[in-house]
Amino acid sequence: MSARGAAACAFLLASTVALAQSPRVLRLEGGAAQIRQKERTARAAGVFGGLWRVEGPRLASLASAAFTWAGDSATAAQGIVAAAWRPTVESAWHTEGGVTASAFGVYALGRGGNRSAYARERVVLDDGGFWAGGAAGHTTRDGRSWHSTVVDVGAFLRSGGLETSVAFARLRTNDWPLMQASGIFLETDAAAHDLDDVTLAMRYARGALALDASHTWRGGARKTLARQTAFLWSAAYELSPRYAVIVGGGRQLADAVRGVPDAMVASAVLRVVLFPWRADAAERATARSSARVEQTAEGAVLVVRVAVNDSARVEVAGSFSGWEPVPLQRTSEGWEARVPLGPGTHRVAVRLGGGPWRAPRNLGKVRDEFGGEAGIVVVP
Amino acid sequence: MTKHLRVLTFAALAAIASLATLPLARASAQEPRLSLIKDDATRDVVRSLLGRAASVGLPTDPLLSKALEGVAKRATTKSIRAALAALEKRMRRASDLLGPNPPEDLAAGADALYVGVPDKTLRQMRAMAPRRSIALELGVLTELVARQVPPKQASAMVLDLMARGATGAQLTALSSAVQADVAAGIKPDLALDLRGRGVMSLLPPPPSAATLQGRPR
C-alpha cells in the first residue's frame, strides 16, 4: 500500500475526530479515502476511528483512536489523549494539553512510530479570542530518531454561525527524510529545517450542516527552501442525532511533529454516535439551560442561554415561533438566543444536537401531550 | 315532481350545503402555517379539526400551535389528533366557564385547566373582571402551578390579588420572584405565600364586588 498515505490518512481521520463536539460522547466512524503522496500514485484505503469525550464544567477530556488499512502493505494507527481545563466556569483562560502516539509503515520512508505532546493557552472572549502554544514530537523510523518542535499563535472571531481564525506557526525539525519526501530542501548544510506556516481557517455551521475550510501558506526560513500552499475542506451533515456523513479533501502539508508526510487526500466517512443516548441529551438540555424575559424599548425579549460549550447545535422553539427551531448563537459561556415575544402565555423548549425538546431549567414546566415537556413564560 | 324539478331541488340543496361549509373550508384554507406540516395525513387531520373548531366559534390559533408543537416533537398523527381533540374540549369548557370572552382568554383558560386549576377559579376570575381580558391573570396562575405551587393555593392568591387590583406587572413580578425563590431552594408554596404577602402589602384592601366589576386595567 501506500503506507505513507496510510499515515496521512490516519492523521486526517484523527484530526477529524479531534474536532469532535459534544460532551460525554462515544462515537465510531468508518469510511473510505484516497491518498496520493507527492510523486506517488493514488491509493485507496479504509479508515476507521473512535472517540470518547467527557466534559465537566471546568475539565474536559478526550481520547480518540484511528486506524487505516490499505490492504497491500502497511497499516497505520494513531491515538490521542487530550484535556482542557479552566480555573473557574466563568474564566476566559483555557489551558489545553495532550499527547499522541502512532505507529505506521510509510512507503519510501520506512516503518516506525511517533509520539508527541502539545500545550496551549486559549483566551476566550465574547465573540472571539486568541491562543498561544507549542508542541514537540519524536519520530522513529527504521532505527533512527528525529525531533521536531513547533510554536504557534493565533486568533479567532465568531460572527453568527461563522468562525474565522488566523494562525502563525514556526516549525523546526531535523527529520530531513520527511522533508525531502515532501519536497522541502536545505539551501546549505544545516542542523535543522525551519518552516513558517500561516493558516486561515473558516468554519460555518447552520442547522445540521457544518463546513470547514483552511488554507495554509508555508515558507522556508533561515536555510530552508520551501514555498507551498495547501487547501483543505470538509463538510459534515447530520442525518439524525445519531448519524452524520462527513466528506472532505485537499492537501495535507507534511507535519513533522507527528511524522506525517505531504499528501493529497479525499475521504468520505459515516459517523455513528453510540452515546449520548437521547435521554442524556434531554437531561443536559434541561440542566444547562435557562430562559428569562427582558423588557426592552422595542418590547419583551426572551433571552435563552444554554451553558454547554461543545454541542454542535442548540435550538429553541415555542409557540412564539410556530414551533420552528430558532438556532442559538455561540458565546463565550455557551449558547444564547434573543427572541422577541408578544404579550401572552408562551411555551418554550430547547434541544441539543437535534435531541428531545425540554423545558429550560428555571421555568415552570408542563408535560406536553407528546411525551415531552415545555416551559411557560408570561409576558404582560 | 318532474324530473327537472327534482334536479333543481338537489342542486339547490347541494349549493346550500356548500355555502354552509364555506366558512369552515375558508378558515382552513386561509391558514398558511398548515403548509409547515409536511405529512399529508397529519395536515388533513389538523385542517379538519381547525375547521370544526372554527365552525363553533373557537379560536384556531392555539390548536394550530399545538399541532405544530406535535410536528416539531415528531409525534404521530394519532397523538396530534388526540392532543388537538383534548385541547378543543378544554377550550369548550373554558368557554362555558368564562362566558362571552376574548379568544385569548379561552386559550389561557384551557392552559389553566390543563395544569389543574379548578373550574370554580375560572368562574370567580371572570366574575371579578367580566368586561376585560383575564388572559394575563390566567397565564400567571398557570405559570405558578407549573412551578409546583398547589392549584388551590395559587388560585386563592391570584384571586386575592385581583380583588385588590394588582396590575399585570405586579402579577408577573410575583411569578418571577417565586421563580427565583424556588431556584434558591425554597418550597414553591412557601415562596408564593411570602412573595404574595409582599405584593399585597403594597395594595389597598379589596373593594366591594360592585366596584370591582368595571375596573379598568
Image (cartoon, rainbow, N blue to C red):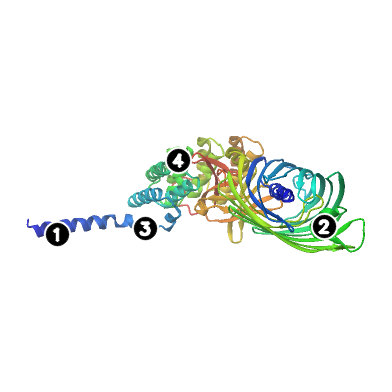
Q: Identify the residue under disc 4.
A: B113
* Spot occupied by residue A144 in the image (x, y as percentages of width and height): 87, 46
Q: Are marks 2 and 1 in contact (CB under 8 Å)?
A: no
Do callouts 4 and 1 point to residues on the same chain?
yes
Q: Identify the residue under disc 2.
A: A180
* Badge 1 element: helix
Numbered disc in front, either 2 or 4? 2
Numbered disc in front, either 3 or 4? 3
* Spot occupied by residue B93 in the image (x, y as percentages of width and height): 38, 42
Q: Can residue B167 be seen from the camera position used here?
A: no
* Badge 3 element: helix
Q: Can residue A178 be seen from the camera position used here?
A: yes
Sooner in the amino-acid sequence: mark 3 or mark 4? 3
* Spot occupied by residue A85 in the image (x, y as percentages of width and height): 78, 44
Q: Identify the residue under disc 1.
A: B8
- Amino acid type of disc 4? Leu
Answer few, some or many: residues within 10 Å of disc 3's Cα (few below 14, many 20 plus, some between 14 and 19): few
In the image, A195 versus B170, the foreground residue is A195
* Badge 4 element: helix
Q: CA distance from mark 4 to mark 1?
A: 50 Å
Say which chain tag 4 marks.
Answer: B
For residue A96, side relative to residue B51 (left or right): right
Q: CA distance from mark 3 to mark 4?
A: 30 Å
Say which chain tag 3 marks.
Answer: B
Do callouts 2 and 4 point to residues on the same chain?
no
